[in-house]
Image: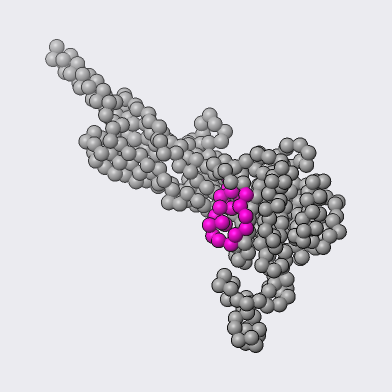
Amino acid sequence: MIEFLLILAVLLIVFILNKYFKAFCASKLKIKLYFDDNKTTEQEEVKLNIELINRKFLIIPIFKINLFINKNIELEDESLKEDFDNEDFYTYTVVTSLLSYQRLKKSIILKPIKRGYYTIAANVTLIDIFGFTKVTLAVNNEIELFVTPKPKKIDECINDSTSMQGNSLVKRWIAPDPIFYSGVRPYNTHDSFKDIDWKATAKLGEFYVKKYDFTSDPSIMIFIDVFSGSETKTYDEIYIEKAISFAASLVNNAYKNKIPVGFGTNSYMKHYVKNIVFPDMSLNNIILINDMLTCMEYKSFDTFKNTMDKYIRSFMDNNIIVFIKYEMSRYLYNIARFLSSKNYKVCIFLYKNSDVQLNDKNIRISYFK
């Protein structure tokens, strides 16, 4: 009889503890996810921090955190991945315990392998000491990660073997070449010290810098058309990724050479509303463009023609217009001729080979890879 009463008492205590745990385990509990920096570049590691705070006496014996991570983001230890019924995500589970009034911080290293805008969601499962009671909670602060495309050298992006209209001139339009310069001009505060022409400086008594065979006070405006067909709304993911990588390389090169650069596209952008920024030399403008390149998706909000018709008359003087397109189209041909007639320099970079030639000193056709 005594044994029966003891068993009954134990079961009653377990029942009460389970009820108490279920009622209060989630109270005064703080779960925070954050990156040291939520902007990174392809193939660069980033640290995800998990901060847990228990502001009550009740101990959490088993604390499971399930992270839902996009498959384009790798773990430092790939063996810790757990697949579930979603082709785009995997789970990573952290198991720990949380004592009374304890603050705990854990970190994991992630490595994104593809540019893009990502979110990481999580839920937690709280389990009592007996393993009978489980309480699952969603973590409210879904966190964002912006992975910008990794810029390359311009020479690595342009396909010399298939270009038809003078790659050396094309490159001098989109980036100054120290071998080619046509004179000097007064020194400005944004000019590089290495560009000072010491002969002219000594002769004229003040600082002068080389004026490159480029254009006078140039700026570059880059456009990407995400359509992979001139007539139909089709999208080639490989083309779009290469176009974005090439544009990132052009933007990075322009910034290094202190050339104002702008960017526009007809791509729909996840988590972003702006689809065009005009040329500027500031770091903020470069960050803005990189954010746009990061958030571009494999679909458009409008046709290339409608986008151009909307913005074509907003171009500044001295713009070099760079079009990045899947293939040549009649509209692109016409708009290039129109811009040339207004004395703009036009660089057309195509992904698909074309037999079209434009015998115009202000227009160059080249190919990217």
Q: Main secondary structure of the magenta part?
A: helix
Instruction: Give the residue displayed 51% in from the left and 36% down from the top.
Output: 90
How far across and how far down the image is residue 187, in percent?
60, 76
Q: Is residue 121 magenta?
A: no
Q: Quadrant of the N terminus?
A: top left
Count of marks placed on residues:
0
76, above or below 201, in the image: above
How far across and how far down the image is residue 49, in percent?
40, 46
Q: Nearer the viewer, residue 253 or 276?
A: 276
How far across and how far down the image is residue 154, in percent?
68, 60
Instruction: Give the residue displayed 43% in from the left and 51% down from the top.
Output: 36
Instruction: Give the residue displayed 65% in from the left and 43% down from the top.
Output: 267
Point out the residue furthest to the top here. Answer: 1
> In this view of the protein, can residue 72 be seen by the observer?
no
Q: How is the image coloured?
A: one colour
256, above or below 310, in the image: below
> In this view of the protein, can residue 196 be seen by the observer?
yes
Give the left or right position of residue 129, taking residue 298 as reference.
left
Corner quadrant of residue 60: top left
Instruction: Please give the range of residues in magenta.
Output: 276-295
Corner quadrant of residue 366: bottom right
Instruction: Give the residue displayed 27% in from the left and 29% down from the top.
Output: 24
How far across and how far down the image is residue 10, in percent?
20, 21
Corner quadrant of residue 303: top right
Point out the residue furthest to the left here. Answer: 2
Give the left or right position of residue 214, taking residue 149 as reference.
right
Give the left or right position of residue 165, taking residue 137 as reference.
right
